[in-house]
Amino acid sequence: MILIKSILITLFVCSSAFAQSNLKLEKFKLSDGIIWAAAFLPDGKILFTERAAKLKIYDPSSKTSKEVSGLPKIYVSGQAGLLDLIIDSDFKKNNTIYFSYSKETAEDQYTTAVYSAKLKQQKLVEGKDIFVAKTDSGKSHHFGSRIRETKDGYLFLSVGDRGKRDEAQSLKNHHGKILRITKDGKAAPNNPFIKDKNALPEIYSYGHRNPQGMDYDSASDELWINEHGPRGGDEINKVEPGKNYGWPVITYGKEYWGPSIGDTHKEGMEQPVYYYVPSIATSGLVKYRGNKFKAWKGNFFSGALKGQHLNRAYYDQRKKKYADEKLAATLELDQRIRSVIHTPDNEMAFTTDNGNLYFVK
């Protein structure tokens, strides 16, 4: 764990069968921008993205952030910009990072892309797009964009429906999909539709709206996501190969102006593990596997953009169903939580739209 002087906030957490009292939040002021993602470098520094097309490194010893040069041209508007970030599992040897961003593909047409580069001091070198999603749209929302590396060295990428909801049901594009690709941007060789001539080979699952939270557990080889619903219907899903998660045919949400969108169930379409009505605007996801809060093992922690809190979803053994709670300590922050991440010791941290990083202690 990084050792620096920090602000410690100790507040009481909502009482429940599994709640932790005296939850502490350790605050790091990284910037003034919207921090979409952060990653911990082997030397203890923190690499992070700002949606406004800035990549920076925070040095705990000097408490300063310095900008990294060498980024590609990034489209910034609305939800578009520099988005998720991970470091390669073999970073100590190859210095490679991957990030997702909004790319202009033609005049007034934009999509989600994944960029790979080597980090040398404060500069990116040998950078290139390894993957550009087939989701061109003139709209500036629903890019998805979370990235996670698997134990086999593949990359999962979430892509939103880009405002073209019906395309989430088509296998001929990347709208509303979870993709699995190699580090060169090719389809992973054992993908579920790899032999289907009527489907794009990168597709791992489909029928998603806008997944902005993702957690991959290498021990169990399980992939979990959360995704934004419309008016209600945010979901937590366990993602399995070839499955259809229903959007927009089934959803627990409604149109923003009131009418229903579809049914809630349909044969051949997956039900969420948990859904939120009303929406909390989920962003970032951790399935907890640390040791500090043993009662929380296996619980899901999502950032709430609209609700401005860290949300815990858990299986209620007494009621035999999932439930959720707002962690009261985070309610006091009055900040939109953008990402929730594992720390190097498998504990939790989260970033906010105010430029802050908090460790949950």
Image: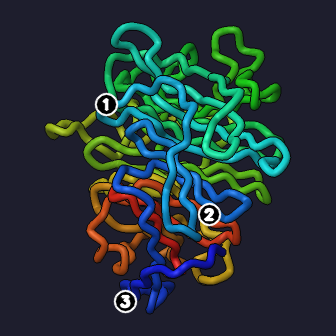
Q: Secondary structure at mark 2?
A: strand
* Left-right relation of 179 to 30: right
Q: Residue at x 41, y 68 (%)?
A: 310
C-alpha distance separating marks 1 and 3: 38 Å
First reached walking from the N terminus: tag 2 or tag 1: 1
List the residue tagged with mark 1: 77
The residue located at (48%, 87%) in the rendering is 20
Cα distance, mark 3 to mark 2? 23 Å
Left or right of 131? Residue 281 is: left
Give the distance between the C-alpha atoms of the residues marked 2 and 1, in whole angstroms: 28 Å
Report helix, strand or loop for mark 3.
Answer: loop
Q: Which dot, 1 or 3, sits closer to the camera?
A: 1
Residue in the image at 55% along x and 36% along y: 69
* Residue type highlighted by circle 1: Ser
The residue at which mark 2 appears reads as 342
- x then y, percent, for residue 38: 55, 54
Q: Residues within 10 Å of mark 1 (few under 14, many from 20)?
A: few
Which-is-in-front pick, marks 2 and 1?
1
Q: Can you tell which quarter of the image residue 61 is in?
A: bottom right
Bin the neighbour count of mark 3 within 10 Å (Cα to Cα): few under 14, some 14-19, many 20 and up: some
Residue 24, position as x, y percentages in the image: 46, 84
Q: Which residue is mark 3?
A: 12
